[in-house]
Image (tube, helix red, strand yellow):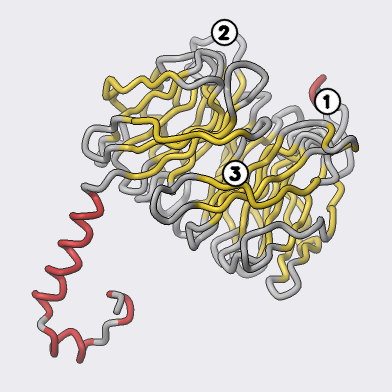
Amino acid sequence: MTLAKVSRRQFMKVGGIGLLGAFAFRAHAWSNQDRVLYVGTYTSGKSEGIYVYRFDPNTGALNRSSSIKSVNPSFLTIDRSRRFLYAVNEVGEFAGKPGGAVSAFGIDRGTQNLRLLNEQTTQGADPCYLSVDSRKRTLLVANYTGGNVSVFPLRSDGTLGMVAEVKQHEGSGIKEQQKGPHAHCIIFDRLERHALGADLGIDKVMIYRFDRAAGKLTPAKQPFAELKPGAGPRHLSFHPSGKFLYVINELDSTMAAFKYNELNGTLMDIETVSTLPSDFSGTSYCADVHVSPSGKFLYGSNRGHNSIVVFQIDQQTGKLTLVEHVSTEGNWPRNFTIDPSGTFLLVANQRSENVVVFSIDRSTGRLKPTGVNEAIPAPVCLRFL
């Protein structure tokens, strides 16, 4: 029996205080259990592939558990049942044919180690992002160099079917990195009525209607939202309320805020702000973005300035107020993640080859280094089980 399914009558029958006490005990027990962290990497150097770590939710300490070989697993996602993990293989050629690949892994229920299930070509070069729907039936993949989004059916055993369709983006931008489309992110909205994709090459957030039964994408009523020329949208993050979407722009180091309509999938611009200090004059490129579980704060990573920018979110308007910039204590921060309790933020510094753990002040959103600094070869993606 879950708390959400307990009626008032049942609550009184079993004893409200006792029931809440039982759930509080379980929550406390969970908070004291080690959690599992998967680390995706680039494998052109010393890395073996995907690393499995135990994370101490009390101290933030990381302890390596195992690893599994995989080629350039630069982005990872886990299905809602927590039985399967999917990884892109960010390459330009797979099995002798142009295009990248996706790998499906089974997660051992006891050890949480990974076992390769199968692989499929993406029909687009250099896949860099993927998302799985809550029903575990469809996997979406953004192919950077291919400039397209691949749609995969998922079988009940977690394996990947062959690509069902490919949505090709068209166009270009004003900067050197924008000679063609570069799909960089694809996510579902909260209700899974739509899927939204950031395309760095054409300065657009693409909006698709998602047919959950058929596992198909079609252009939405508003097929895209445009960013400023040369912005280079890279990653997306929804506010927990579903009312706002935040877009981190790689090429001009900005954060764009949009109001989102969940019913028809439309976006309306709110504001765009810099992710860098006003006195910074060097070269920097944004990478990743996440809203805190509380919905109160927004975080973004800056490669070059080597920092995490922290914003406070106005819950009514979605507007952003700068809180601080914090050094990532490493070089070239890529993906970062917030642990399930909202207590810690972990950053993958690709070039300095380390993962650094920060504690989060829940009232202010500010970050403080914990002293945990784990050496991991070329880390680029962090994903909690």
> In the figure, 244 relative to 142: above or below?
below
**Residue pointed to by mark 1:** 174
**Residue pointed to by mark 3:** 236
Q: First in sequence, mark 3 or 2: give its number.
A: 3
Cβ atoms at labels 1 and 3 below 8 Å apart: no
Q: Residue at x 50, y 17 (%)?
A: 353
Q: First in sequence, mark 2 or 1: give its number.
A: 1
The answer to which image quadrant residue 270 occupies is top right
The spot of residue 297 in percent (x, y) is 39, 41
Name the mark nearer the viewer: 3 or 2. Answer: 3
Q: Amino acid at mark 1?
A: Ile
Q: Which mark, residue 281? A: 2
Neighbourhood count class around disc 2 (C-alpha, 10 Å): few under 14, some 14–19, many 20 upward: few
Q: Secondary structure at mark 3?
A: strand
**Farthest residue, direction top:** 282
The spot of residue 237 in percent (x, y) is 54, 46
